[in-house]
Amino acid sequence: MSKTVFLILMTMIFNSMDGQNLSGTWLMIKDGATYGKPMFIEFENDQILHYEISEQSTYGALEKKLVYSEKLSETKNKLVNEKRIRLYRMGKTHTVISETESKTEDTEFATDYERIEPTSTNLSEKEIQEVKFKIEWNNEKFDFIFNETLDSKTIQEVNKRLANQGRKLILENMDGTYFGSIYDNGIRETLIAIQEIDSDKIILYGFPEEPYQVVSYEK
């Protein structure tokens, strides 16, 4: 491959967002391999602004705090769809082979972000917290019930002995978007965005794999 063709291809990869609408706030999508606090990004000119959120919400309202920025033009990225962007970063993978041997390799990691939008609902916050849903995603089933423990009876007994709070789903919001926030022992782990909710139907989005959106009906 000639040097000219290589440079053209690299320019296409690193500037694939040119001309795209990147307005709004985007939620970082966590998967099983993603650790750390939930975060958001926003795009401003050629900058990607990275925000963390307050550890505890104020009456359910989340507050953003800018932690760092980077140049969009210097990132490898892909627009998955009009509401989802994927950013690629290089990192290290450390593999333990034996008690005396290990190896470290350069690895490309991908993180998805989904654009959030105001939740469509006619319910009050109190009414939202009273509805109950059974969610099914990728053959996994779980209860979507606010302010009640999400743990099994067995785990609840263990938590009781250890004086742990366990896992709960808490309703939080930011700029008109409602989230089901999963807390584990008082620490927020994951935000699940709510697109629409009424007394007998809920639409959730921001899942790590397809389907990125789930529609469910009252439990």
Image: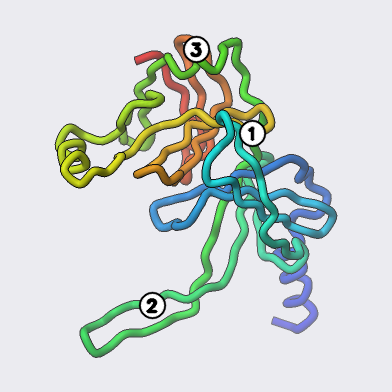
Select label 2 or label 1 by which is in front: 1
Select label 3 or label 2 by which is in front: 3
Q: Which image quarter holds the N terminus? A: bottom right
Per the rendering, the mark at residue 127 is 3
Q: Looking at the image, which residue is at 60% across and 47% down?
A: 53
Q: Which SS class for mark 2?
A: strand
Residue type at mark 1 is Met
Q: What is the C-alpha distance between the residues marked 3 and 2?
A: 47 Å
Circle 3: is it few (<14), some (14-19), or many (20+) Cα within 10 Å?
few
Foreground: 153 or 82? 153
Q: What is the C-alpha distance between the residues marked 3 and 1?
A: 18 Å
User: Which of the 4 image quarters holds residue 217?
Assistant: top left
Q: Are marks 2 and 1 in contact (CB under 8 Å)?
A: no
Residue type at mark 2 is His
Counting residues from the start of the chain, the first of labels 2 and 1 encountered is 2
Q: Is residue 2 left or right of residue 119?
A: right
Q: Is residue 210 left or right of residue 82?
A: left
Disc 1 target residue? 174
Disc 2 target residue? 94
Counting residues from the start of the chain, the first of labels 3 and 2 encountered is 2
Q: Which SS class for mark 3?
A: helix
Farthest residue in the front direction?
163
